[in-house]
Image: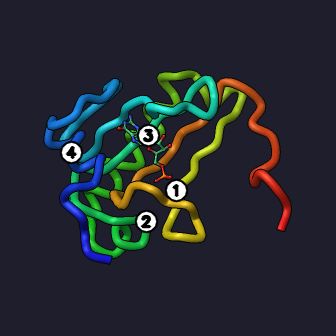
Amino acid sequence: MSYDDNNIFAKILRGEIPCDKLYEDEYALAFNDLYPKAPVHILVIPRGKYTDIADFSARASAEEIAGFWRMVAKVAEDKELPGEGFRTIANTGVNGGQEVPHFHVHLLGGQALGPMLAQAA
Ligand code: 5GP
């Protein structure tokens, strides 16, 4: 899949549409999900143009990959999620239900999140 420069997270990165920003550095940006599914629902995205986790893992530099995952961990720590536990999700492609084609990780917490999937296969 080629990268779509008009996806919503590309527009957020360019500052064309607003977001409820929590953290940013040279590698990544963290902001609140507009439609939260849990008391804490944060999205972390790399600054680079990567469509999904496979694209990110294949093409991003070691520094970008480390910077991205360190921000995921930093956000979780700063929101005090590790104590009670939390969930990270990277939806990928059609079966994964990925809506925005810019790689992102959901950080969910603040309550017991229940089973991993809404319904068993
Ligand atoms: P996906 O289904 O691609 O894994 O998740 C995309 C997420 O982006 C969804 O949880 C959705 O609520 C969130 N989202 C969609 N549009 C916007 C937006 O304009 N701003 C923010 N902050 N989140 C958005």
Does the numbered disc 1 mark a residue whose Cβ is under 8 Å from ligand 1? yes
Reading the image, the residue beneath label 2 is 53
Q: Is mark 3 within 8 Å of ligand 1?
A: yes
Give the residue drawn at x 45%, y 56%: 99
**Amino acid on which disc 2 is placed:** Ile
Front in this rendered view, residue 77 or 98:
98
Instruction: Give the residue at mark 3.
Output: 43
The alpha-carbon separation of the residues under discs 3 and 2 comes to 14 Å
**Amino acid type, residue under disc 4 in the picture:** Lys
Above or below, 17 against 110 in this view is below
Can residue 104 be seen in this snapshot? yes
Question: In terms of secondary structure, where does tag 1 sit?
Answer: loop
The answer to which quarter of the image holds residue 53 is bottom left
Q: Amino acid at mark 1?
A: Ala
Label whose residue precedes the other's in the sequence (4 or 1): 4
Badge 1 crowding class, 10 Å Cα cut-off, few under 14, some 14 to 19, many 20 or more, is: some
Query: Where on the picture, by quarter, is residue 20?
Result: top left
- Image position of 36 (left or right of 63): right
Residue 114: which numbered mark, if any? none
